[in-house]
Image (cartoon, rainbow, N blue to C red):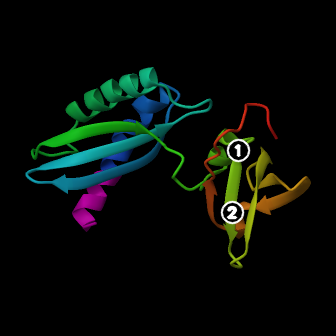
């Protein structure tokens, strides 16, 4: 990404954070990619309890209004896409761990080892996982990468 593109992404994030916060939504990612003569601006949002289609519709209106009232996107045309965070994005912030409580995660630690367990609890500095019936505290500082694992056939309440 060029430095001018990085500057636009940072300016867009700064411009849309407040209107999205008013909807109780967090900005998770802002991506700007070329698409022929246009650009595609993707903004991923998230919130406690998950994002609904109504949330995405309200977020799209709020982002569109914020961008129309500013000049951060310049004159070149763009297409706006507002999406939910998605399960394929790594857990990088304490709120990501909190929002995935009871979900199965695969954690690659900074020492290269991996651990797979269910998120039991999380705080500002670490998460507690149930790994085969035993609790293990994982400090975020020791996490190189953490991803939610897709589980088929898991019933709500299964632990």
* Mark 2 closeness class: few <14, some 14–19, many ≥20 residues within 10 Å: many
Quadrant (top left/top right/bottom left/bottom right) for the C terminus: top right
Q: Secondary structure at mark 2?
A: strand
Q: Position of residue 91 (x, y in %)?
A: 60, 54
Quadrant (top left/top right/bottom left/bottom right) for the N terminus: bottom left
Q: Which residue is mark 2?
A: 107
Q: Position of residue 31 (x, y in %)?
A: 33, 52
Q: Position of residue 144 (x, y in %)?
A: 63, 69
Q: Is residue 108 visible?
A: yes
Q: Is residue 57 above or below residue 122?
A: above
Q: What type of secondary structure mainly makes up the magenta span?
A: helix
Q: Is residue 97 above or below residue 137?
A: above
Q: Position of residue 33 (x, y in %)?
A: 24, 55
- In the image, farthest residue toward the front: 153
- In the image, farthest residue toward the right: 134
Q: Is residue 149 left or right of residue 53?
A: right
Identify the residue shown where x is 31% and y is 24%.
61
Q: Secondary structure at mark 1?
A: loop
Q: Which residues are magenta?
A: 1-10
- In the image, farthest residue toward the bottom: 111
Q: Which mark is residue 103?
A: 1
Q: Is residue 76 above or below residue 158?
A: below
Identify the residue shown where x is 50% and y is 32%.
25
Identify the residue shown where x is 71% and y is 38%.
154
């Amino acid at each position: 990404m060029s430095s001018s593109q990085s500057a636009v992404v940072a300016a867009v994030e700064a411009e849309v954070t407040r209107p999205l916060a008013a909807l109780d939504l967090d900005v998770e990612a802002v991506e700007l990619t070329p698409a022929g003569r246009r650009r595609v601006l993707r903004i991923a949002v998230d919130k406690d309890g998950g994002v609904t289609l109504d949330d995405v519709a309200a977020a799209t209106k709020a982002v569109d209004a914020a961008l129309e009232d500013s000049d951060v996107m310049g004159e070149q045309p763009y297409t706006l896409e507002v999406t939910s965070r998605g399960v394929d994005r790594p857990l990088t912030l304490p709120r990501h761990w909190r929002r995935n409580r009871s979900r199965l995660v695969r954690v690659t630690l900074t020492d290269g080892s991996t651990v797979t367990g269910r998120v039991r609890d999380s705080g500002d500095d670490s998460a507690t996982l149930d790994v085969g019936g035993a609790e293990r505290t994982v400090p975020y500082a020791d996490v190189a990468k953490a991803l939610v694992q897709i589980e088929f056939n898991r019933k709500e309440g299964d632990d």
